[in-house]
Image: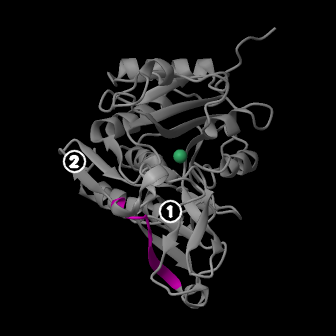
Amino acid sequence: MIDKKSKKFLKEYLGNASPTGHETKGQELWLDYISPYVHEWHTDVYGTAYGVINPGKKYKVVIESHADEISWYVNYISDKGNIHVIRNGGSDQTIAASRRVNIHTPKGIVRGVFGWPAIHVRKGKDANLAPTLENIFIDVGAKDKKEVEELGIHVGCVITYDDGYEEINKKCFIGRALDNRLGGYCIAEVARKLFEEKIKLPYSLYVVNSVQEEVGLHGATMIAQTIRPDVAIITDVTHDTSTPLIDAKQEGDVRLGLGPALTYAPSVHRKLLQLIEEAAQVNNIPFQRVASSRSTGTDTDAFAYANGGIPSALISIPLRYMHTTVEMAHFEDISHLINLISASLQQIKSGHNFKYFDR
Ligand SMILES: [Zn+2]
């Protein structure tokens, strides 16, 4: 399933920077890739992009992922020229020290590093100093604030890492922002599969890549109102809990390579979930199960609770080291997820009634 063409797209898509609020570049790459496989495509004012297959039908189904990646904002520049940051999304300060960064400025990318005091000079109470949001800083090699500003850096510039795609042990690959470019990649591949295999669907299918998930599901909230779909299948990533220092009893038992994970939660519609499980069983697609108390924390919640309720479900890709620069996924999980969405879409009928009960 992952052929040369799709791998080239995956690498390119993972390699671009699309920090929350600045997703345009990634969205353009994504639209370029899916446009041959959809009948029309659109964008909204905040940058959410979507392709439509069979436009104009009364019954509308969405498959969705989020396009944005976590990043940092320049928040304060000291007189000595050190740049202090705040989060844009759930960025992890514990992995910041010693990382190379790209600062996105009106004059283009400025390179910098998250500096850190050498082990030799960390003494006494600082011997075990750990990175916190208060003590991390970026150094761009400037002598003072004026020199920093001359480079084009100002408060509000966004900062990303540039760690890209790398294959590991043939079966796996690593990179940053696999959360959730992998979802965007998978729904694009679903569109391609439907097109290439000439699969006809009896409804309009919206293939949606939403912005601003990492700061509160905002792109999905906006686009759910715009499209007003009848059903939504969401893709995101979920934690592989088999690596050290994670309690699977708390976080659930999910592992790379055992298939996509289906979430059970109040916002996940039970009848839609059952349809997906049956599609998996009929097509021999392996899957894992996750339970979420209260919300799923994904765009699923935004769709489920929009417009008087949209039957929604969540299919996730197992992922190690979420929100680090070495997020790791398994090729087979990706293929299975693409097949599972495609199989599920073929089980949904036009006018499919998902009501739990009627009287
Ligand atoms: Zn995330």
Q: Position of residue 48 (x, y in %)?
A: 63, 58
| Image position of 155 with respect to 135: above or below | below
In-image side of 255 versus 349 (left or right):
left
Q: Is residue 191 visible?
A: no
Q: Amino acid at mark 1?
A: Leu
Figure check: 78 above or below 341:
below
Give the crowd class for mark 2: few <14, some 14-19, many >=20 residues within 10 Å: few
Q: Tell me which colouring the rendered structure shows.
A: one colour
| Camera-side residue of 63 and 23 | 23
Q: Quadrant of the N terminus?
A: top left
Asked if residue 333 is among those painted magenta in the image, a careful observer would answer no
Question: What is the x, y in percent for residue 104?
Answer: 54, 75
Q: What is the three-letter code of the residue carrying label 2?
A: Ile
Query: x, y (%) of residue 286?
Result: 34, 23
Residue under the image location 69 percent in, 32 percent down: 304
The answer to whether mark 2 and mark 1 are in CB contact below 8 A is: no
Q: Which residue is mark 2?
A: 168
The residue drawn where x is 35% and y is 59% is 119
Q: How many marks?
A: 2
Label 1 residue SS: helix
- Residue range of the region highlighted in magenta in the rendering: 108-119
Is residue 225 visible in the rendered image? The answer is yes
Give the mark nearest the N terminus, 2 or 1.
1
Distance from mark 2 CB to nearest ligand 1 atom below 8 Å: no
Provide the residue designation for mark 1: 31
Q: Which residue shows up at 59% across the image and 84% down it?
A: 106
Give the farthest residue toward the left: 169
The mark closer to the camera, 2 or 1, is 2
For this rendering, which residue is in front, 249 or 238? 249
Q: Quadrant of the C terminus?
A: top right
The residue closer to the viewer here, 122 or 10, is 122
